[in-house]
Image: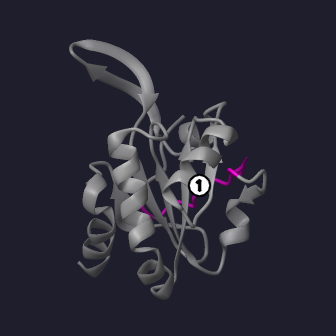
Amino acid sequence: MEKPKTGDPAPDFSGTDQNGKTIRLKDYRGGRLVLYFYPKDNTPGCTSEACNLRDNYEDLLNRGFRIIGVSPDSTTSHQKFSTKHSLPFPLISDTDKSIMKAYGAWGEKSMYGKKYMGVLRKTFIISEDGIIENINIFDKVNTRDHTRQILETLEK
């Protein structure tokens, strides 16, 4: 499946969050969305990224953004992760990897010379009308300061 590009309509999705609620992309129309993909709950980089977005959540809301995180972890894992770190945004459980594949966030990785399939850490900014915004597909996420990375890119 080809990954979406800047200016493309964001691939539609529906998934279940940590509270058992169904989350749909169409429910987020009318506001900008930070859709971020991460490999695993409670790992150092993923925790840093989630907590950075949590710490800047009010500022992002005030700028018109909402946030959704997506990983292949279970809803139970997401519930524990969200509770432990007081995350104010939904985390979708994508155990079948359909959302990740639609966004090009599932693919070949390499570690110590071994190739394997896994989650590619990516963030997409989706416009009010469901379009992937210009210059806002992040392939190199700064997990400790992701909010600043998002806002600086949008200011350019």
In this rendering, position of residue 37 left or right of residue 128:
left
| For residue 13, side relative to residue 113 (left or right) | right
In the rendered view, tell whether residue 44 sits above or below residue 23: above
Q: Nearer the viewer, residue 143 or 9?
A: 143
Residue furthest top in the image: 114
Q: Badge 1 is on which residue?
A: 83
Residue 9 colored magenta? yes
**From the viewer's perspective, is residue 81 above or below residue 149?**
above
On screen, residue 135 above or below 122? below
What residue is at 78 percent from the left and 56 percent from the top?
21
- Residue 27 position, x and y percent, is 73, 69
| Magenta stretch: helix, strand or loop mostly | loop
Q: Is residue 119 magenta?
A: no
Q: Which residues are magenta?
A: 6-18
Q: Residue at x 51, y 81 (%)?
A: 61
Q: To which quarter of the image does residue 96 belong?
A: top right
The residue positioned 60% from the left and 45% from the top of the image is 80
Residue 29 placed where, x, y %? 66, 74
Image quadrant where residue 102 sits? top right
Quadrant the N terminus occupies: top right
**Picture coordinates of residue 43 (x, y %)?**
39, 38
Q: Which residue occupies the foreground of this view, 61 or 101?
A: 61
- In the rendering, at what x and y percent does residue 28 appear? 66, 71
Q: Hey, which residue is sitting farthest bottom in the picture?
A: 62
Q: Amino acid at mark 1?
A: Thr
Q: Kindly state the secondary structure of the residue where label 1 is placed.
A: helix
The quadrant of the picture occupied by the C terminus is bottom left
